[in-house]
Amino acid sequence: MKKKTIVLFSVIAILIGFELLLFFFMVSKIEHDGETINISGQQRMLSQKISKLCLQIENETYSNLIDSDLKEELTNIIELFVASHEKLQKGHKSDETEELFAKLQDNYDKLVSSAKKIANSQDDENALIIIVKNEGLFLFTMDRIVFQYEIENGKKTNNMIIVMIIIASIILLFLVLALKLIVLPTINKEKQNLNIIKKKSLQITKQNDELTASAEELRQNNEELLTLNEQLNEANYLIQEKNGKIEKAHKDITASINYAKRIQEALLTSKKLIESYFNEYFIFFKPKETVSGDFYYMYKINKYIIFAVADCTGHGVPGGFLTMLGITYLHEIVRQKEKTNSGFVLNQLRQRIKNTFKNFEQAANNGLDIAFCTINTETNVLQYAGAYNPLWIIRENKLIEHKATRNPIGSYPKEVDFKNNEIQLFNNDVIYLFSDGYQDQYDSENKQRFTKKRFKALLLEIHKYPVEQQKELLGDVLKKWKKKNPQIDDIAILGVKWKI
């Protein structure tokens, strides 16, 4: 019996030790990746600081007011940037992150080389252009590296939990075997000994030695039970400690997602800016998760107001990354080209999106659907182009639908140019742009969608109300429709009441 006890508890001790070693190994991996993510964030801030200082130095040079303090600060920042990059290169890399680091290196080399030229007052008129161009690519690739590390951290955490559960189950099984093979037989044997003592009271003296031996065996069994109880308490403490670390990892991941949300909100057009463009408008913006795959965009160039609502592939964090890409590209096209032809802008945006995913060899189904408009504030002429997403205008209680081109912003087997539609606006026209999230929402029984037909009828019913009340009614109707059923997609609706 002692041999069985030793064997069983030896196996349990080995399993607990192995579980602890494996746990601390996995935690060290996760903490190392977390340090790499922190260095990546430092690289982002340093690259932006380099670009800002180079722009300041170049402006000073143009006005013949060279500030040596700026160049000295730039030299120090470059040294920090290079040292931080070397630390980043020494970190653990998977095949995916190794490939991203290889793509990052070219942008890094060009950025550092050009910044050193400016810091050393070398005459190179293209240096600033190279810095600005490569900074954007560097930041984009760095974002992908951070995102990849976060994915790998999630996988490591899940794998660690699964292994811990398996080993804990095996330990529990051995404890049950110990109870069945050692403790219960011992208890039964002691009961038999007590019955024998009662029946043979006359033989107490003769059997004294046997009784003493039985008492000693009972004491040993009690000690073993106490030891087992201590081991169980220790195992319970370790499990609680592991649960605390897992909870902390979950909080860290949640904090990262919330930070991504704040970045996305910073890219969306601010309320103050929108109110300078439109007197009467509302935005019903309801992400399915913390980060949205839908976005809205507004800008003004001279006499033209530009606005759009888009629905990117996916939702949550993946969709959020696409929204940041879409907003950035759309803003660059609008500002640099200064074109007000909506069809031209969407053709340019499609080409930028295609080139991006082609360069990084990603799947062809990444892209977005969008309704894009410009309004000439002098002639009240609206230009519209759409990629699957239509434009609805309600005029004198009638809903006028302007259909979109049946092509996405992205790769497509049969691509056609996006059609530009010119529409004369009249006083009190109500303009609606939207993604498909509202009309695709299932009801409380998960049997039918809200549908495009119901959505049209709802807008016709509420379009005469003040815009803020329209927004409240859209929220109330959605809540009553789905009840406790979860939201299935991101929702974005823009409503504008045009005044002449």
Image (spheres, helix red, strand yellow):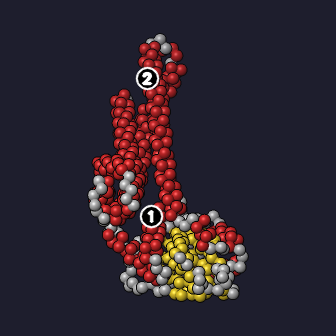
Q: Is residue 269 above or below residue 180?
A: below
Q: Is residue 381 above or below residue 256?
A: below
Seen at 38% across and 46% down, the residue is 35
Q: Residue furthest top?
A: 205
Q: Residue furthest front?
A: 64
Distance between the alpha carbons at the discs numbered 1 and 2? 65 Å
| Residue where numbered disc 1 is placed | 321
| Residue where numbered disc 2 is placed | 220
Q: Disc 1 marks which amino acid?
A: Phe
Instruction: Determine whether the residue tagged by mark 1 lies in a helix, strand or loop.
Output: helix
Seen at 59% across and 88% down, the residue is 424
Q: Tell me residue 282's x, y (percent).
A: 63, 71
Give the foreground label among 1 and 2.
Answer: 1
Q: Nearer the viewer, residue 138 or 456?
A: 138
Query: Can you see residue 127?
Result: yes
Query: Can you see residue 306?
Result: no
Q: Tell me residue 121's x, y (percent).
A: 30, 56
Q: Earlier in the sequence, mark 1 or mark 2?
A: 2
Q: Quadrant of the C terminus?
A: bottom right
